[in-house]
């Protein structure tokens, strides 16, 4: 089979790697891919959102399966377009991707179907939103309705912060014209439950936890994710059962009921609060960096899983029992401005997996080319061992302009 993976970054590298292990896969294309992915797939210079070009490429090459990484491609309607042309694609149509692309859609759906989530109200008008905030409690959570590349959520501790965020979103239209969802502030450990979904069929992956803050101790600005691990000691079997029975399965069924059946990965961003597990957000795709720690545990044939889920068949999905932990190496200055082009050495010495997030090739060497540059992932029988191994391995990467957190996974033992 010839397959196409749409996207770049560590998540796509992990998807490409998993597909490369399948005996059915003869050739992998990745659009646009990156320097690391190029070792396993032929990278094609087509943008993730260039839906018509991607479709023409898939037809011309006789691609039998396309897997979509980023939400921007879903919002651009890639699944609608491919399905209309009878091309098999793993990823939801635009109407179903609203569960990620519109916070209001997701919140209204959860309210209508009694799926546990924070209390909320939606506003278009600055004055009405401001009155609501003043009448409520602090901290409060303000979310821009549309896609904002992870920057559309503000947790305001003070009224001044809330007012500034509301002005940015509703008056200055910093992310474009749109509404704001104002939400009750919840507390508790967060975790990600990703499921393969087609209609009402929902198959869970091992739960993972991301680390969104830039520095150790969960300090510093929010990032795209500085590390992740799987096997969460604080999530019990009962918690998982609850999350599947009260959140993931009812949400998939609600989407069918609403006429926008979901096919792809439904990502539940969940929080274990004192009053039960609640939804913080849904994503309509694989998480990043969760995918980089989840897929190395897949024992089954990745290509078969994608095809079966897309075709509405029951997939065989088996997972390795071992724990995984990944540490991200990011350019100094990230998530603010940073320099590019620094040579990276030591990659071949890593005993574990390495997924490229933002690298380029120069004179037969890899150089940094993004904010997050790569993630080192190690597997071991226990989370502690996976953590120790990953922290030791990551030190083997030599580069003048990278930093990483040294406490990925510590939280698992503290809740
Ligand atoms: P989101 O983009 O919706 O995942 O929000 C980004 C981050 O903001 C989440 O990972 C949480 O850490 C935090 N957050 C979002 N909503 C809430 C909430 N209602 N209460 C507390 N923290 C939240
Ligand atoms: N890890 C968070 C995300 O993929 O959105």
Image (tube, rainbow, N blue to C red):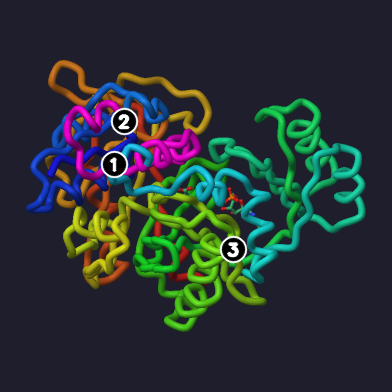
Q: Is residue 77 magenta?
A: yes
Callout 3: 10 Å neighbours few (<14), some, many (20+)? Answer: many
> Which residue corresponds to the image point at 76% horizontal and 53% vertical from the top-left?
140
In the rendered structure, the answer to whether residue 238 lies left or right of residue 27 reads right
State which quadrant residue 358 falls in. top left
Callout 1: 10 Å neighbours few (<14), some, many (20+)? Answer: some
Q: Which residues are magenta?
A: 56-83
CA gap, disc 3 and disc 1: 33 Å
Is the residue 235 above or below the residue 164 in the image? Answer: below
> Which residue corresponds to the image point at 46% horizontal and 56% vertical from the top-left?
262
Magenta segment, principal secondary structure? helix
Where the N terminus falls, by quadrant?
Answer: top left
Residue 84 lies, in percent from the top left, at 38, 39
Q: Which residue is mark 2?
A: 55
Residue 69 lies, in percent from the top left, at 36, 42
Is the residue 373 above or below the residue 409 in the image? Answer: above
> Which residue corresponds to the image point at 40% horizontal and 66% vertical from the top-left?
207
Sequence-first tag of 2 and 1: 2
> Which residue corresponds to the image point at 28% horizontal and 65% vertical from the top-left?
313
Is the residue 279 above or below the residue 287 in the image? Answer: below
Q: Which residue is mark 1?
A: 87
Question: Judging from the image, what secondary structure is the residue with disc 1 in?
Answer: loop
Question: Judging from the image, what secondary structure is the residue with disc 2 in?
Answer: helix
In the image, 203 versus 194, the foreground residue is 203
- Mark 2 or 3: in front is 2
In the image, 247 versus 131, the foreground residue is 247
Query: CB under 8 Å between callouts 2 and 1?
Result: yes
State which quadrant residue 236 falls in. bottom left
**Residue 365 — which label?**
none
Q: Which residue is mark 3?
A: 279
Q: How many marks?
A: 3
């Amino acid at each position: 089979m010839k397959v196409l993976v749409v996207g770049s970054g560590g998540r796509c590298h992990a998807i490409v790697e998993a597909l490369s292990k399948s005996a059915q896969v003869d050739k992998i294309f990745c659009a646009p891919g990156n320097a690391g992915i190029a070792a396993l797939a032929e990278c094609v210079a087509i943008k993730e959102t260039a839906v018509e070009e991607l479709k023409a490429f898939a037809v011309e090459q006789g691609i039998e399966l396309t897997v979509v990484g980023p939400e921007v491609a879903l919002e651009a309607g890639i699944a609608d377009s491919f399905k209309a042309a009878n091309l098999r694609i793993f990823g939801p149509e635009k109407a179903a991707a609203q569960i990620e692309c519109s916070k209001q859609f997701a919140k209204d759906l959860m309210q209508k179907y009694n799926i546990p989530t924070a209390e909320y109200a939606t506003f278009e008008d600055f004055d009405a939103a401001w009155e609501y905030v003043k009448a409520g409690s602090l901290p409060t959570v303000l979310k821009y309705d549309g896609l904002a590349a992870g920057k559309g959520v503000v947790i305001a501790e003070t009224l001044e912060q809330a007012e500034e965020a509301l002005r940015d979103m509703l008056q200055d239209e910093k992310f474009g014209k749109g509404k704001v969802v104002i939400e009750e502030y919840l507390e508790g450990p967060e975790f990600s439950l990703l499921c393969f979904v087609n209609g009402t069929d929902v198959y869970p992956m091992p739960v993972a936890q991301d680390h969104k803050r830039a520095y150790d101790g969960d300090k510093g600005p929010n990032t795209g994710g500085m590390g992740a691990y799987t096997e969460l000691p604080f999530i019990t079997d009962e918690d998982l059962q609850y999350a599947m029975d009260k959140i993931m399965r009812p949400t998939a069924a609600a989407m069918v009921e609403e006429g926008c059946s979901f096919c792809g990965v439904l990502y539940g961003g969940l929080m274990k609060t004192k009053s039960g597990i609640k939804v913080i957000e849904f994503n309509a795709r694989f998480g990043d960096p969760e995918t980089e720690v989840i897929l190395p545990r897949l024992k089954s044939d990745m290509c078969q899983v994608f095809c079966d889920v897309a075709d509405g068949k029951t997939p065989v999905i088996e997972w390795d029992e071992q724990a995984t932990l990944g540490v991200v190496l990011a350019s100094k200055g990230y998530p603010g401005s940073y320099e590019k082009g620094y040579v990276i050495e030591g990659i071949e010495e890593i005993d574990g997996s390495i997924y490229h997030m933002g690298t380029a090739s120069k004179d037969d060497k890899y150089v940094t080319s993004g904010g997050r540059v790569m993630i080192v992932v190690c597997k071991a029988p226990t989370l502690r061992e996976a953590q120790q191994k990953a922290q030791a391995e990551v030190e083997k990467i030599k580069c003048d302009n990278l930093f990483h957190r040294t406490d990925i996974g510590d939280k698992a033992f503290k809740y």
